[in-house]
Amino acid sequence: MKCPYCDHLDNRVIDSRLNKDKTITRRRRVCANCEQRFTTYERIELMLPMLVKKDGRREPWNRGKIIAGLEKACEKLPVSIADIDAFVDEIERKLQDAGGKEIPTSTIGEWVMEALPSLDEVAYVRFASVYRQFKDVNEFMEELKHFIGDRENS
């Protein structure tokens, strides 16, 4: 592991801890050269299917992209980074369970739309407004009517 301060490769681990779900290992390290301390995180690399975009392009799963979108949707709302991380963990589990070598991004978008109301209803509305790419206010109002109807029926 390269030191972020001096680029030296020799360091040692002084503390290791698992997160609550035991899926991420946090390690405190000290550089043998400059003696600066830094933290690294280890996560199992999953073999996830390639994502097929609307225009047919293929790209690998990027956890950071979905986290960025959710952070934007949850901005100034009482949703913690830990909640967003757990939400994305669940999407990754679904991706892994789906099997196959490719999956359309629209499927992932629908998974997010289905689960997001349980995280935060305002975040759902924000995410839906971007994801659905409404042409006008009437389309947006129709989505809200369906959302409210679904909430009342459950």
Image (cartoon, rainbow, N blue to C red):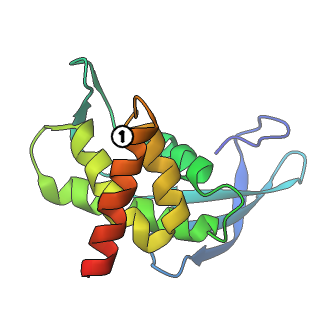
Residue appearing at x 9%, y 44% in the figure: 100
- Where, quadrant-wise, is the N terminus in this rendering? top right
- Where, quadrant-wise, is the C terminus in this rendering? bottom left
On the image, numbered disc 1 is attached to which residue? 139
Residue 82: image location, x then y, percent: 58, 69
Instruction: Please state which amino acid type lies under the numbered disc 1.
Output: Glu
Q: Classify mark 1: helix, strand or loop.
A: helix
**Where on the picture, by quarter, is residue 54?**
top left
Residue 143: image location, x then y, percent: 34, 51
Residue appearing at x 67%, y 65% in the figure: 77
Q: Is residue 82 above or below residue 41?
A: below
Task: Decide: few, some or many residues near mark 1? Use Cα within 10 Å; few <14, some 14-19, many ≥20.
Answer: some
Residue appearing at x 76%, y 43% in the figure: 3
Tell me if I can see residue 47 in this picture. Answer: no
Q: Is residue 113 left or right of residue 80?
A: left
Q: In this view, does 91 lie above or below 132?
A: below
Q: In this view, does 117 lie to the left or right of 54?
A: right
Residue 60 versus residue 7: which sits nearer the camera? 60
Tell me if I can see residue 61 in this picture. Answer: yes
Residue 112 versus residue 58: which sits nearer the camera? 112
Tag count: 1
